[in-house]
Amino acid sequence: MTLNKQDLEQMVQKWPLLADMKAGHEVTWLNDQKSKQESSHWPITLKDMKEADERLKRFAPFLAHVFPETKAAGGIIESPLIDISGMKAFLEQLHGQTIDGRLLLKADHLLPVAGSVKARGGMYEVLKLAESLAIEHGFLSLTDDYRKLDSPSMREFFSRYSLSVGSTGNLGLSIGMTGAALGFQTTVHMSADAKEWKKNRLRARGVNVVEYADDYSRAVKEGRKLSEQTADSFFVDDEQSKELFTGYSTSALRLEQQFKEQGIQIDEQHPLIVYIPCGVGGAPGGIFAGLKRVFGDHVYGFFAEPIEAPCMLIGLMTGLHDEVSVQDIGLGGRTEADGLAVGRPSSFVGKAVEPHLDGIFTVTDEKLFAYLYTLFTFEGEKLEPSALAGMEGPIRAVKSGWMASALTEQQRAGAVHLVWSTGGSLVPQAEMNAMLERGEKLSGTI
Ligand SMILES: *Cc1c(COP(=O)(O)O)cnc(C)c1O
């Protein structure tokens, strides 16, 4: 569907927020469709999550073997949970606004192998595929030591299959690294936003990188089409995949454990409020679904998008999901937040989160860089621009009036604000330095 001028005028009349978005302003949208009923129709159950976690545990010895950086953690791909009270104080001062409760960072930028949240969904989907192919052909049983998959004969077996994906960069990194480690013939279709270093890193691993001058939807479409024409070929479909979604959701089980270890209570009087950057929706959707399954009504969620690519916000607010794009409302979709440079959301994810999400807010690229610099200054963490989209979340939750209306005073005092950091540790040093410099200049202007 493409909107004509009249459709668009009607839409803007019905949803005045669209006018602000069209004009390039930041917005905070609160979901008034949120229903009180509990999450019975999530696409995943707690059982699915536990099975996925078991599968990841079966693969841990293999991962520790082929990716030395995962050895210390025994091949479990996980990230730390960090208190960022220095950043909290900075945000409060900058915005002249107290944030009740505490502020934590889920540091997925430190996830090994892929250096981003995509290590969760992407690696999971490839590992699951490898497991089922190997079992189906009699090379593996569930009780085996999975290190046996790292052999010339197994790599020869996997090389009969091709694996492909469309990506703005990070999903390609995750699928490419894992696919190549197993021996799959792996092709990554990269959109124009993908950073050069991500492509180079993949090529160095023998992954076939196809570049498009166009946006992400095109890279996915072409990749999907080529895969359909190829025998023994699998396409990781970021817009539709339940496996990716499930892989992301396992983070909630791990987080539950980390809260316990750090003595952090999540309950009625200590609600958890998460702020997650959103591209096509798979990562934030899967994480939020997992958290809802684990913490139920005690978790609240906001997604964050760049002002140029608020695809999930438009899709959810209008209920049109993937039938509307950011281009339809006159936005270019171009942003330095390459992981979020998506013009059309996943309808699978949009429909799943619709009755549960509390809101979505947008941020300028300038702020992403300014926060990149200040987070490094106050907490020593280096993130890529996409990963900072959620940083202003607690401020927005307060300033929009959401905190005051959704939570009691006691709940506000006990609130745990969790900003999800989605990528950055693999950014080459020179690029990181350039981004820090840019952020430093902008930090006085936001
Ligand atoms: C992919 C990505 C996201 C968002 O994930 P989606 O599944 O596209 O919504 C956020 N941050 C970073 C760094 C990413 O790479």
Image (tube, grey):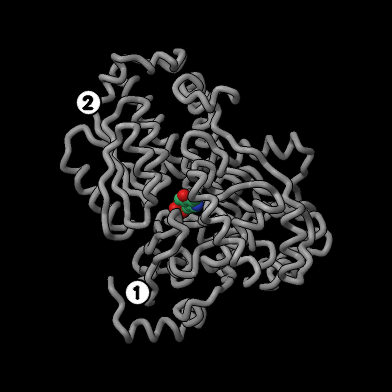
User: Counting other residues with Cα less than 10 Å from the Cα at mark 1, is it few (<14), some (14-19), or many (20 or more)?
Assistant: some
Q: Position of residue 135 (x, y in %)?
A: 34, 19
State the residue position of label 2.
160
Q: Kindly tell me whether residue 362 is visible in this rendering.
A: no
Which quadrant is the N terminus positioned in?
Answer: bottom left
Q: Can residue 332 be seen in this view?
A: yes
Q: Are marks 1 and 2 in contact (CB under 8 Å)?
A: no
Can you say whether 144 is above or below 365 in the image?
above
Q: Within 8 Å of ligand 1, the CB of disc 1?
A: no
Residue 13: where, in percent of width, then height? 45, 86
Q: In which quarter of the view is residue 226 placed?
A: top left
Q: How many marks?
A: 2
User: Which residue does the image show at 55% across and 73% down from the upper left?
Assistant: 26
Residue 193 spot, x, y in % from top left: 37, 57
Q: Mark 1 points at which residue?
A: 328
Real-space CA distance between mark 1 and mark 2, rounded to the nearest whole angstrom: 41 Å
Task: Assign a secondary structure to mark 2.
Answer: loop
Label 2 CA crowd tier, 10 Å (few <14, some 14–19, many 20+): few
- Residue at coordinates 47% horizontally, 43% vertically from top-left? 118
Q: Determine whether 99 is above or below 175 in the image.
A: below
Residue appearing at x 82%, y 64% in the figure? 409
| Tag 2: amino acid | Arg
Q: Which of 45 and 336 is in front in this view?
A: 336
Q: Which of 177 and 293 is in front in this view?
A: 177
Q: In which quarter of the image is the C terminus?
A: bottom right
Q: Is residue 113 left or right of residue 412?
A: left
Q: Is residue 141 above or below residue 446?
A: above
- Mark 1 vs 2, N-terminal side: 2
Q: Which residue is drawn at 57% across and 51% down?
A: 39
Q: Which amino acid does label 1 sit on?
A: Asp
Q: Is 209 displayed left or right of 105 in the figure?
A: left
Classify residue 342 as left or right of residue 117. Answer: left
